[in-house]
Image: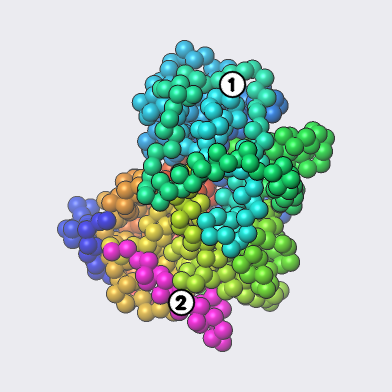
Amino acid sequence: MLTEPIQTSGSGTGQLRNANGEANAQTAPDPISKTQLKQSLDSACEALLGARKADGSWVFPLEADCTIPAEYILMMHYMDEIEPQLQSRLANYLRAEQTPEGGWSLYPGGAPDPSATVKGYWALKLAGDSVEAEHMVRARKQVHAMGGAERANVFTRIELALFRQLPWRGVPYMPVEALLLPNWFPIFSLSKVSYWSRTVMVPLLMLYTLKANAKNPTGIGVQELFVTPPEEVRDYFPVRSPLNRVFLLLERTARYCDPLIPAWVRKRAMAKAERWLIDRLGGLGGLGAIFPAMVKAYEVLDALGYAEEYPHRMTALQAIRELLVIDGDSAYCQPCVSPVWDTALASLALQEVTADRPQDDPQVEAIRAATEQALDWLRPQQLLDAPGDWRDKRPDLAGGGWPFQYRNDYYPDTEDTAAVAWAMHQSGQSRYEFAIERAANWVHGMQSKGGGFASFDVDNVHYHLNEIPFADHGALLDPPTSDVSARCVSLLGRLDTTGRYREAVERCLIFLREEQEEDGSWFGRWGSNYIYGTWSVLQALHETGEDMTQPMVQKAVGWLKSVQQQDGGWGESNDSYADPTLAGGGLESTSFQTAWALLGLMAAGEAHSPEVRHGIHWLMTRQGDDGLWQERWFTAPGFPRVFYLKYHGYSKYFPLWALARYTNLIRQPE
């Protein structure tokens, strides 16, 4: 981690200090003009209001790495449902995102990734690019330099096997009979893995058991990407740990026993899997409302013999198409959509704009009307009585959560729920009281034994499963995390007027105290990275009425100040997930990370500090003429070190939130 942070002064116009306590060459700017601050705030506010949909909600694009648009092309060829114009647009996007080295990375500025590069090359070849084209030669050389296609991850090797580019022994043994294992079975059961793992694994188990084959009408393959011919490779599963070695031996034994499985057992397992999948297709939401699960579900429906005109199959395809973002001659596919999350956060930012301002101010009235329309849109999205996998652990808990997407009935999440209920409570409108009560009760009931909160499940901490051959990505589970716990305890702390949630709040605060890093920061599971986690926890400590002068808080404040950049902003690379010594740095300043750092510092009482003033100045001077901020950097991990995202809304509502909070706090005396 970084060296011990220096706690700099809390007010005045003094110099900023670096992590070694030395004064930065650039001093904090002079006091900010309130007129210019108001202009910046009004411009950002107007831009955000202008981005609303007709129903009052917000939803911004959610961009992932190039594996998603590449997989869309692969899906079209797997199903022999090729749309030439769409394929051309997706291919244009892939070519534009290729790195100078020839590969594809998981996020801008990242190193080329073997699996992303295999899929990028493969998709472009399917789209008609010549293997002798300069960009394809570079890509092929990059794959070879990284060990060849045989070194791609399990998901990529499964795709290669489906297209008959790799023998089935090159993927983990995944019989559908695994779904028959009861929840109490010590090694594996479906309920022991995360929601995203479940929704991807079930269709994959079915495709594996059926040994499904892609239709692949052009017959195009990628044998040239292998360093060793795939039939000759003997080390598809390098040993990752002693426990992984044990699982590899168990898997090898089970694979040899596959012919002994009775036909009636296999039939029963396939029927259970099919029923499980159909129940969770979710209409236009799709299976799990995430692209990888939705695509494999669509392919399974075909493998099971569902005709093209069958309603489930038609809606499954339409749900996938709804994820496309088309911009002229280019297109990409989103991994999912984020309307609930975007709407909740945009509402919270706008509520900050109107805080402590006169009720009869016309601008305030317009903003409040907009936020209440957004909350009215959110209210019927709450899942009160819907079935859900979370009920496996909490069968007697009443529903009350919100999903991240438009439809994901089986999988509400605690963080979206906490954010929506926070915004509803902050509105002060009595019509939201029932929704808030049900949300708080559900979040409270989803607390894990250790005091923290996970996103979708309770006590999803079966860490041994990250060592099974299938889990080479290390993201099979949904354990409690600091950022999600912070959001949940913020809500419970706000609502704990009678002591009903006090024990849960105290347990969560102990969890957060134990999760703090040595340098004072907190890890960010769902936002990049330690800056996000540290803001989340500092905000939670403020919301729960904690003493913000206590050492834990001041250590976090010192860390945030220590990683402020010379220009006054903050920026942290996703490289910090692989290399924690880069925590808080490794990237130029970004609007969303600067906003997170500012919100964290202001929650800790640092609104009048030179560091905060310098950060506010950075936001104001980087704001575009349209009132917004633009940058290419990805904002969050889907799975750390494996899959990353760019929430396009983060550069729109988080800077506004920080400017509004600063405006409100500087009205108050130091």
Going by the numbered disc 2, the residue's amino acid type is Arg
Task: Kindly identify the residue that appears in the image at 46 percent across and 62 percent down.
Answer: 481
Separation (CA) of disc 1 from disc 2: 54 Å
Residue 497 is inside the magenta segment: yes
Residue 7 is inside the magenta segment: no
Task: Kindly identify the residue that appears in the image at 62 percent across and 18 percent down.
Answer: 219
Q: Is residue 319 visible?
A: no
The image quarter in which residue 372 lies? bottom right
Q: Where is residue 614 shown, x and y percent of the image?
A: 32, 57
- What type of secondary structure mainly makes up the magenta span? helix
The residue to which callout 2 is attached is: 507
Give the SS element for disc 2. Answer: helix
Magenta segment? 491-518
Going by the numbered disc 1, the residue's amino acid type is Ala
Which quarter of the image is occupied by the C terminus? bottom left
For disc 2, the neighbor class at 10 Å (few under 14, some 14 to 19, many from 20) is some
Q: Residue furthest top?
A: 132
Give the SS element for disc 1. Answer: loop
Q: Where is residue 227 shown, x and y percent of the image?
A: 41, 22
Nearest the camera: 468 or 542? Answer: 468
Q: Is residue 272 found left or right of 222 in the rendered image?
A: right
Q: Earlier in the sequence, mark 1 or mark 2?
A: 1
Q: Where is residue 517 shown, x and y percent of the image?
A: 32, 63
Is residue 352 positioned above or below 590 on the image?
below
Marking on residue 127:
1
Is residue 198 positioned above or below 71 on the image?
below
Q: Is residue 444 found left or right of 372 in the rendered image?
A: left
Task: Kindly identify the residue that appears in the image at 28 percent across and 62 percent down.
Answer: 519
